[in-house]
Image: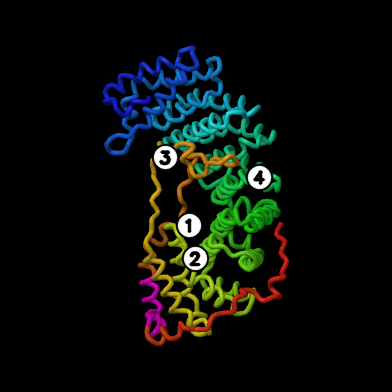
């Protein structure tokens, strides 16, 4: 293990079957070091940054490797040996589809182990690698055949139910992540087993623990993505329950971004008629938070939400809902928040949402053409061009195989992000808009054809953009006092 990088690959490959046989040694030290050495060899990088040892080179040893690793967990003193479980996780990650034939046996052993350790969780690293191994089993098998997701649910749900019923706090964030992974694999429908659980996920007690919040939000997003019609068509208390969670999260500086994740999914996926009565209240809540404690993180999330709303419901609807809360508020939001702050938005998808939303405001909102809002047209276009021109760095390493717990930014005692439960970044606009710059050019051309003189920055508009600033308070005193109850 220590000299692995000094040894030629041929010798490492010769050592692999010898190390595998040492996994059967009765000595705890011996089989632990054998597992640790194998795990370290499997993370070594080759010349093209992939694993030095390939799945194909491991093919002759795959069955023996898996057998001996699981047998080692049965040896005295190693029932919760984190080095063995980490070696199991890394072996799954390296072997990929080569483990599929063994999954029915392996998943039974993993779920049995999970049931045992859930009685008295005492080894955090062991438990983490156990859940990572479960996630890898699901991902690898369902990638080959998505229909197999139901067999994983049959195996895992009884154990998960017991963990949830017994409120095993250490395991709840993990269970929520694995459930999200399973639900995201389904086609656009939610099995009844998930819907039965849905009301319990809205219980206030679950949201009191900070470690539950990120995985619970992701799980609710999966529910909204796969079953918004089912949620909207079922008992009427579900939408107020979701909005109650949003209200709680949005009030917290630490978790307000999670509140926006949930809100964005509600706006994107829920049928418009199911939330129409709540929309104005949602905006009032957001303005109250802006008034009481405005942070950069909140502003960035707010900008993405406002523009997503515009993309979903149209620029006229956005202008009307702002102005229904307070006269001329649409102009205040443009001048005090969107124009000066939009360049702070980071992330390719977030920038795309803002670009498409602002393009719609510029070219599809009549109030921008012939009211007092017209003076904001040019500054808004300039802000959008600034958004396009900002340098962007969204490089995230794809090779999750090499991630250790200690390297994972989400790792803390309260919540451990599972690297292999990772969620793909979601683009709510998708293929409807390929390139926002092209959309802007096309929309401006269409606008200038319909309204001659619009669609370009000219000297007259340059002078218009120097308007007096709006007073500091975003809301009038009468609106600050609006009390809202969504729970």
Reply above or below: 184 against 441: above
Instruction: Give the mark toward the camera: 3 or 1.
Output: 3
Q: Are marks 4 and 2 in contact (CB under 8 Å)?
A: no
- State the residue position of label 2: 311
Local SS, label 1: loop
Residue furthest toward the bottom? 460
Q: Are marks 1 and 4 in contact (CB under 8 Å)?
A: no
Quarter of the figure that contains the C terminus: bottom right
**Disc nearer the start of the sequence (3/2):** 2
Cα–Cα gap, marks 3 and 1: 24 Å
Residue 261 within the segment the image draws in magenta: no
Considering depth in this image, is 137 or 340 the residue closer to the camera?
A: 340
- State the residue position of label 1: 428
Q: Position of residue 251 (x, y in %)?
A: 65, 58
**Disc nearer the start of the sequence (4/2):** 4
| Residue 409, numbered circle | none
Q: Residues within 10 Å of mark 1 (few under 14, many from 20)?
A: some
Q: Are marks 1 and 2 in contact (CB under 8 Å)?
A: yes
Cα–Cα gap, marks 3 and 2: 33 Å
Could you tell whether 125 is left or right of 58 in the image? right
Cα–Cα gap, marks 1 and 4: 29 Å
Magenta stretch, residue numbers: 440-457
| Residue 209, numbered circle | 4
- State the residue position of label 3: 400
Reply above or below: 178 against 246: above
Q: Position of residue 361 (x, y in %)?
A: 48, 73
To which quarter of the image does residue 4 belong?
A: top left
**Disc nearer the start of the sequence (1/2):** 2
Residue 276 visible to the viewer? no
Q: Are marks 3 and 2 in contact (CB under 8 Å)?
A: no
Q: Residue at x 72, y 61 (%)?
A: 485
Local SS, label 3: helix
């Amino acid at each position: 293990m220590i000299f692995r990088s000094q040894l030629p690959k041929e010798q490492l490959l010769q050592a692999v079957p010898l190390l595998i046989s040492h996994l059967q040694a009765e000595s705890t030290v011996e089989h632990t070091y054998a597992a640790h050495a194998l795990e370290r060899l499997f993370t070594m990088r080759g010349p093209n940054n992939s694993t030095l040892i390939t799945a194909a080179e491991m093919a002759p040893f795959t069955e023996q490797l898996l057998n001996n690793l699981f047998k080692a967990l049965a040896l005295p003193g190693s029932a919760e040996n984190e080095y063995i479980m980490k070696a199991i996780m890394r072996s799954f990650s390296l072997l990929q589809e080569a483990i599929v034939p063994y999954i029915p046996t392996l998943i039974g052993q993993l779920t049995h182990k999970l049931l045992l350790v859930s009685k008295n969780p005492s080894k955090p690293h062991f438990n983490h690698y156990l859940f990572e191994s479960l996630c890898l089993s699901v991902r690898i098998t369902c990638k080959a055949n998505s229909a197999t997701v139901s067999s994983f649910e049959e195996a895992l749900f009884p154990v998960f139910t017991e963990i949830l019923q017994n409120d095993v706090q250490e395991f709840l964030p993990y269970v929520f992540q694995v459930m999200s992974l399973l639900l995201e694999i389904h086609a656009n429908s939610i099995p009844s087993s998930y819907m039965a659980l849905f009301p319990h996920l809205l219980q206030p007690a679950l949201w009191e623990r900070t470690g539950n919040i990120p995985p619970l939000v992701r799980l609710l997003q999966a529910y909204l993505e796969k079953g918004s019609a089912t949620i909207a068509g079922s008992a009427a208390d579900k939408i107020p329950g979701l909005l109650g969670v949003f209200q709680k999260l949005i009030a917290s500086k630490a978790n307000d971004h999670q509140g926006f994740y949930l809100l964005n999914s509600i706006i994107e996926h829920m049928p418009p008629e199911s939330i129409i009565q709540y929309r104005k209240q949602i905006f009032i809540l957001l303005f109250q938070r802006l008034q009481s404690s405005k942070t950069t993180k909140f502003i960035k999330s707010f900008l993405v939400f406002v523009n997503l709303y515009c993309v979903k419901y149209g620029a006229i609807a956005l202008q009307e809902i702002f102005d229904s809360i307070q006269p001329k508020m649409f102009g205040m939001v443009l001048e005090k928040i969107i124009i000066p702050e939009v360049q702070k938005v980071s992330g390719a998808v977030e920038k795309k949402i803002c670009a498409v939303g602002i393009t719609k405001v510029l070219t599809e909102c009549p109030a921008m053409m012939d009211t007092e809002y017209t003076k904001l047209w040019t500054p808004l276009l300039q802000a959008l061009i600034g958004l396009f021109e900002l340098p962007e760095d969204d490089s995230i390493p794809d090779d999750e195989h090499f991630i250790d717990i200690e390297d994972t930014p989400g790792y803390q005692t309260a919540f451990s992000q599972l690297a292999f439960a990772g969620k793909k970044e979601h683009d709510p606009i998708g293929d409807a808009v390929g390139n926002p710059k092209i959309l802007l050019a096309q929309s401006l051309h269409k606008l200038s054809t319909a309204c001659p003189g619009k669609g370009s920055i000219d000297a007259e508009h340059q002078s218009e953009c120097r308007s007096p600033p709006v007073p500091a308070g975003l809301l009038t005193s009468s609106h600050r006092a609006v009390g809202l109850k969504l729970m």
